Image: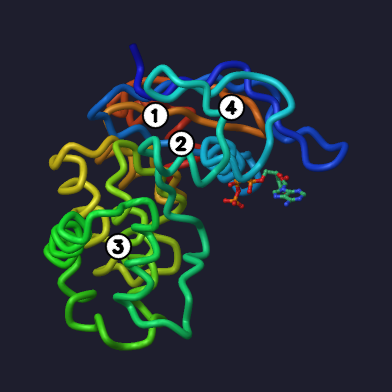
Amino acid sequence: MALLEIENLHVSYGSVEVLHGISLHVDEGEIVTLLGANGAGKSTTLLSISRLVNPREGRITFDGKNLLDYESYQVVGLGVAQSPEGRRVFGTMTVQENLMLGAFQVHSETIKQNTLEWIFQLFPRLLERRSQMAGGGEQQMLAMGRALMAQPRLLLLDEPSLGLAPLLVKSIFRTIRRISEQGVTVLLVEQNARAALKLASRGYVLEVGNVVMEDTAKGLLANPRVQKAYLGG
Ligand code: ATP
């Protein structure tokens, strides 16, 4: 059984349908990537899983549970955490305070401290800046770290490399690999299709609200249509 299964998902904003019945699945331990142009519906897919937008039709099953029966904060408790596009960290709070927000469902102080140490190992820069106000170049890591504070089984990453300098992009992709090796399943939305496909085991291509391709990451990398549309020729 898949850890996450989306079936026939339809989502509208007002009267405009932007997801037209997409289906996809993510197995435990996988990194799966969702590729597509701006506006294809990638963020909407992640927001639907997190229950931040309400689908009109379809099913989203996580670990056998129908997520549409749960509120967004409960979805975090079930083991799904999202690192949102645009980072959304709180600039009036320190790095460590922002991280702690992610653990709002974790009640044991020992577990919180251990998770915090794990995140500081993954992102040493956050350790250096733990007492500084959040902002600047580490916002993306902070958003990822905050999601990881919930100790998710499934991590939803929306454009983790967006706006980062090339060296930081490499470092973020290496860190996603480490997170995956430590047992967290990852659904990754990325504009940087080549890097995402090098990291992922499988991928889906979304075009104007439909899944138009699904294959192994190797298959997608070798696919002339994917090369032309998403890999710069
Ligand atoms: P991007 O990389 O630009 O975020 P995306 O593939 O993640 O693209 P979505 O953000 O899911 O795409 O957007 C899908 C469609 O829904 C787009 O046409 C977008 O304009 C529209 N849309 C997104 N959010 C809203 C909203 N809150 N209200 C109305 N329309 C929206």
Mark 3: few, some, or many residues within 10 Å (few <14, many ≥20)?
A: some
**Of the residues under marks 2 and 4, which one precedes in the sequence?**
2
Quarter occupied by the N terminus: top left
- Contact, CB < 8 Å: mark 1 with mark 2? yes
Q: Alpha-carbon distance for marks 3 and 1?
A: 20 Å
Residue 156 position, x and y percent, is 41, 44
Mark 4: few, some, or many residues within 10 Å (few <14, many ≥20)?
A: few
Which amino acid type is marked by label 4? Answer: Asp
Residue 123 position, x and y percent, is 19, 66
Residue position marked by numbered label 3 in the rendering: 169
Residue position marked by numbered label 4 in the rendering: 69
Q: Alpha-carbon distance for marks 1 and 2?
A: 6 Å
- Circle on res. 203: 1
Residue position marked by numbered label 2 in the rendering: 34
Label 4's element? Answer: helix
Q: Alpha-carbon distance for marks 1 and 4?
A: 27 Å
Q: Alpha-carbon distance for marks 2 and 4?
A: 24 Å
Label 2's element? Answer: strand
Give the quadrant of residue 108.
bottom left
Residue 109 position, x and y percent, is 21, 61
